[in-house]
Amino acid sequence: MQLISHFERAAHLHPDRLAFVQPDGEGISYASAAQTVHALASALRAAGVMEGARVAILCPNDSVGLLAMLGAIRAGLIWISLNPRNTVEDNLTLVETAGASVLLFHKMFTAEAERIRGGLSGSPLCMELYYLAGGGRPSGAKFRSAGEYGLPALSYDMDRPCAIFATGGTTGRSKGAVWTNRTWETLIANFWTCAPQTDHPIHLCVAPITHGAGALALILLPRGVTNVLMTSTDPGAILAAIERHRVTHLFLPPTVLYALLSSPLLGKHDTSSLIFFLISAAPVGADKLREAVGAFGPVMCQAFGQAEAPFLLTYLSSADLVRALTSEADAHILRSCGRATMFAEVEIMDDCGHILGPGQAGEIVARSGLVMAGYYADETATSAVSEFGWHHTGDIGIKDGAGFVFIVDRKRDIIISGGFNIYSTEVENVLLAHSEVQDCAVIGVPDDKWGEAVKALVECKAGASVMPEDLLAYCKEKLGSVKCPKTIEIWERLPRSPVGKVLKRTIRERYWVGRERQV
């Protein structure tokens, strides 16, 4: 079933239900949303945009962004996700690489749109979403005036590309992962085999709709989701919104979860409506998960995926977490990202393409309908990431006898110090368990004696004060002398990508400047 078909079905079954709640509180029904989506699809095709063309969308967390995504897909076009938190140069690069010929933009990004317009190919079309949507509200009025040309026919093709997502770019230049209807179908099926069933999910979009939150908004369409959009990641505002809207579904990256857990307002709002609180985008320390379950109840879950194979290659359920918290024999599961989901094969592979057994460290690889069709216009990179017939995630992991996968490190983040392989996530998990630590990054830095020395950069919780020497003593007690950082620095704020991932590449460059290799 094609992605757009789920939206059409939800609009047919629940025309009066709110599809979106704007940041200002205004609601938009499914009937109104469908009218806007159809009108935009007609307008785009009437303007000469042919099926298969690439449409870049630049929008913050606003319903017009999601409506534009659906409109582009309904027209048979390929939606390119531009993150407004990216630099203009990064978004321009993606637009040029993907050969986009259309740019749809929110009125607050008019200046950025003018700069990006020059990167559009062919006879470019650049349209402001709010103008097209009728002024102050995405009512569809002006879409109708531009789109009274009939709804374009849409062929049923599960292998038709419909979206291009930028990869994380935490270890190098971002690429465009191509998602087809089959990618979405597998993602939706996988999600609903994992998530609690509900007739009316209410989803709080906190993370950018250009990435995880937007994907989850579309994944929830088969159940007629109401998407509540937020433009702030303020912990107090998030907690208040959960209570006010009786939110059932929430996705956050670890960095925002950590801010919630350290907020003085935690426990001051009713969050009992939550039934599914997903943490993804980066590994979460076991102690943080324990704290989160204590704060929000048995609704926490964790998933592992990436732009190339979204969200749900593996899944750690709330039941798994409760078992880990109540059984000493299962406590190690807290460090896991879960087991392979129903529609994914996940294995551990060595550099020669051999599948490894339980307890052996290697690269996490996958085969699934979740896996992208490839990197757009990059056959070399696509071939490399698909070696031996498996998708290579770039993450090092171990799988135990029960099938639980444990992420050990990014393949490029292994620190080789004095001939020993040291996995940075192991050190990071120890630091994250410290009561004064909000977040951290562990890297290897050049060292004349050891080749590389372990260095930790620590971001403390608000109001906390801890000395580097105290953290060093703490790490040495927990890790021993080999894995313990040689140095620790306290940073006010760690650099992060637009989706909240700590940018180790940016940190590492500071210490390896002027060297031919960063290893």
Image (cartoon, grey):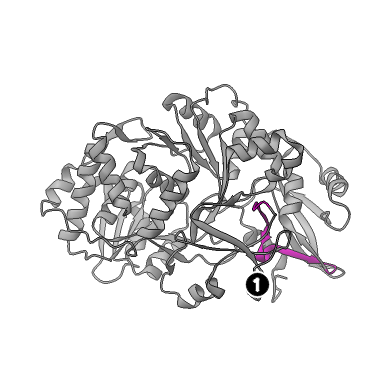
Please tell me whether residue 165 is drawn above or below residue 325 in the rendered image. Answer: below
What is the total number of numbered labels drawn onto the structure image? 1
Q: Residue 417 at what x, y percent from top left?
A: 82, 66
Residue drawn at 37 percent across, 56 percent down: 112
Q: Residue 375 at what x, y percent from top left?
A: 45, 69
Q: Residue 131 at what x, y percent from top left?
A: 23, 46
Residue 509 at least partly seen: no
Q: Nearer the viewer, residue 16 or 262?
A: 16
Residue drawn at 68 percent across, 36 percent down: 290
The residue indicated by pointer 1 is 354
Asked whether residue 73 is drawn in magenta, I would say no
Residue 316 at least partly seen: yes
Q: Is residue 266 left or right of residue 124?
A: right
Q: Nearer the viewer, residue 426 or 8?
A: 8
Q: Residue 108 at what x, y percent from top left?
A: 35, 47
The magenta segment: 402-419
Specify the farthest residue to the front: 401
Please tell me whether residue 490 is drawn above or below residue 196 in the rendered image. Answer: below
Q: Is residue 200 left or right of residue 300?
A: left
Q: Is residue 202 left or right of residue 457?
A: left
Q: Considering the numbered disc 1 on the image, is that residue within a helix, a strand or a loop?
A: loop
Please tell me whether residue 198 is drawn above or below residue 375 in the rendered image. Answer: above
Q: Nearer the viewer, residue 417 or 127?
A: 417
Which amino acid type corresponds to the residue marked 1 in the rendered image? His
Q: Is residue 478 left or right of residue 323?
A: right
Picture quadrant where residue 504 is located: bottom right
